[in-house]
Structure formats: structure tokens, C-alpha cells
Amino acid sequence: MTSIASNPDEKAPRWLVVWLAALVSLTPFSIDSYLPAIPAMAAALDTEVERMQYSVSSFLLGFALGQLFGGPLSDRWGRRLVGTIGLSIYIASSLLVLFTDHVDQLIILRFCQAVGGGFATVICAAIVRDLHSGREAAKIISLISTIMLIAPLIAPVIGSALLAVGGWQSIFVFLLLYALAMLVLVQLLLPETVSRFTRARRQMMPLKSLVGSYGQVLRNPRAIGFLIAQACVSGSMFIYITTAPFVFMDYFGVSANQFPLFFGICVLGLICMVQVNIRLLNFFEPRNILLAGIVLQLLGCGLLLLGTMTGVKELTLWMIPLVLVMSCIGITGPNAAACYLEFFPKISGSANALYGAALFITGGILGGMASSLHTGTLTPIAGSMAGCAFVALLSALFVAKVRQPIESDIPATRRFTPR
């Protein structure tokens, strides 16, 4: 395939959004399809469920590190090469998982699998930033998010079905095959958006320049404000994922077979909000929609906290504000990413890597904190979510200064030109 970067007159492939969404979906498939199998894997590996949950934490950490290293390397070596390396690591790790017989081996292999996944998926938003900016970038990220959200909607169902039919190993066979399909996609369909000249120039730079690119990001306070705001908004989602089994199955008595249904309702709300966001972008700037989404999430968290403090026992009364809280991520996510990346057109790979890693690290910490505050009630969960939304609002207003224009707020759709 001809590189877009080497031919600025060539338009991005028509199906690029679908391809990027499929690649990004590797992450939710890797996490959500595996959750239903944790008790069965604990029994098979002769360990406790609590010990098995470390394999989830190790995946989140590995994914964050994979993004941190993969992002700047994709600026230096090109998007496709880094994606290929990442998927190769992911495939090899998934194959070794099939032969593991100890929980510690699984924890290490899940870490390695996640590093490869981070390498592979970090290139997606960077490719979007290479080709688009402003409102157009936010729209493209929203479209990718819409398609990608199918994965967490169906992943628990797929995991449960595979567990029943072929045991826990069949889930990793599925992930292995999916990664192989993504490797073919990267090699044959995904365009290269970093020109050969740019890659050659960057490869002549010392390796310490990789760290320097992160320093450039960290020295931009407005960009960091957008990052912190979205990290806190997404923190509610990680708190939800971490505590969902307790909330639905222990507190409200939902059966294991019905769990994917309630888990998926919030995902459906997310999909609907992403569609709303795409339409709002025809009339409003991404930063304004972001602020509205954060305020809306804070309202939902307030309703959740009020309900728990009054001793809510009805699942419906919990689900309505919870869906609102989760759905708001469909409004904030694409716009926060688009606003943040606007500050770094020449190091979008590094910037996106730091962004993604920060979201996963923050989410892992917040999810762990919510679990450690366990009291047998829903109050710590709702309180943690409300705290996240409040910090997100403060960061958006006073650090990102979301009410002030960004330099490239002018609507733009541009073709890629070599840097």
C-alpha cells in the first residue's frame, strides 16, 4: 500500500475508521471477555480469586507502559512498524498463556500481552491526528468510539460462551485469533501516516529525545488539564468495572447469567451519547461539549450518592443515574482527546501514548482505592465517582481553561502533509 505520508494528494482510505476501531477493540476484548472466567481460572490454577485479580491489574499496568513506549517509537519508526511489533508480542504471549500452570506465570504473561496491546493500539489516535484536526478529529474519534464500544458490549457474552464450551483456554485462543486478524489488517490495510523523510530525520535524533517529547507534553499546562479531566471522568468507568460484580451479584442479587445484560446497558448508553456527540460537533466546539459532559456526569454522580445515602435497595433507582454517569464518557472522551492532541501536531504519537497511559494508570489506582474502601454498601463507590467528577470539573475550568479558545478551534479537515 502507498503511504499517505509520502503522497499528500492521496486521501485516507474510506474504511479507515472501521479498521482503527477494530484495532482499538483489542483492549476491551482482552479485559472484558476474560472477566467471567476468573473464578474458573482460579480453581484450575489452584489459587484464590483475589490472587487471580492481580492478572487484571498487571494487564492495566502493562498496557499503560506499552503505550508510553509505543507512542514515541511510532513517531520515530512509523505507525505500521510499531503496530506490527506490538501485535507480535501480544500473539506470542497469548500462545504461552495456553500452557501456563501457575497464577504467577499468568500474571507475568498478561503483563507482556498488555505491553504488546499498548504498542498496537496507541497508533490509532496518532493516525487520526496525523490526518485530521479540530472538530473533524473529534468526529472521527467519536465514530471510532461508537464502533469500538461494540466490543465491551459483547465481550462478556463471548467470554461466558467460550468458557462453557471450551474452558478458560478457549478465551485466549479467541484473543490469539483476533490479534492475528489485526496483524493482517496492519500489514495490508492500515496506511502509514509518517513520511519516510520524517522517520529518517527522527531516527537520527538521540534516544533521549523520546523522553524529551514527554517533557514537551508535561510542560503544557492546558493540555495536562484536559488529560486530568478525562482521566477522572474515565476513572468512574474503571471504578464501575472493578466493583460491578459486587454491586450487581452480591448487593442486588443479579445472577451470573444476567450480569452481562446489566453490564451492557451502560455500554449502550455510551454508544447513544457518542452519536449525540457527533451531532453536537456540527454546532459546538469540542471544549464546550466536554465541559457540558463533565457537568452532566457530576449531576449523575450526585444522584447516585444521594440514593446510596438514603439506603436505596431498588436496582432501577441505581441503574438510571449509573447509566447517565457512564454515558457521559461518550461525550467527554472524544472531545478531551481531540482538545489535548491539538497542542501536539508534531509528536501526536508520544502525546497520545502519555494520554492513554495516564487514563489506564489513574483508572487502575481509582478502581483499587474503591475496592479498598469496601464497606458492604454502595456509598464508597458512589462517593468515589462523585469525587472523580468534581476533580474533573475543577481541572477543566482552572487548568485546561476550557472556556478559552484553542488555537485551532477553526473547523478543519486536512490532508496529511509531510512534516
Image: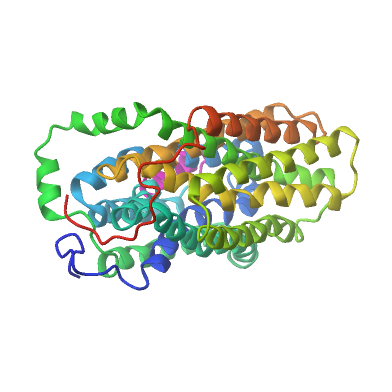
Given residues 111 and 383, the one toward you in this image is: 383
Residue 165 image position (x, y, % from top left): 62, 68
The residue positioned farthest toward the bottom in the image shown: 14
In the image, residue 258 lies at what x, y percent? 77, 60
The answer to whether residue 222 is above or below residue 106 is: above
Indicate yes or no whether the magenta region holds residue 398.
Answer: no
The quadrant of the rendering that contains the N terminus is: bottom left
Please tell me whether the stretch drawn in magenta is mainly helix, strand or loop.
helix
Question: Which range of residues does the magenta coloring cover?
Answer: 101-116
Colour logic: rainbow
Q: Residue at x 42, y 39 (%)?
A: 355
- Answer with left or right where residue 119 lies relative to residue 303: left
| Relative image position of residue 42 (x, y in whole percent) | 62, 44
Q: In the image, is residue 191 above or below residue 247?
A: below
Check the image and report above or below for 378 versus 148.
Answer: above
Which residue is depicted at the point 57% across and 51% down?
A: 331
| Residue 114 colored in magenta in the image | yes
Point out residue 5 in the picture as x, y percentages from the top left corner: 19, 59
Q: Count all numbered tags in the image, as a single digit.
A: 0
Which of these two is toward me, 274 or 57? Answer: 274
Could you say which quadrant of the image residue 149 lies in?
bottom right
Give the left or right position of residue 9, taking residue 52 as reference.
left
Q: Is residue 40 visible?
A: no
Residue toward you, 78 or 286: 286
Viewer can see residue 242: yes
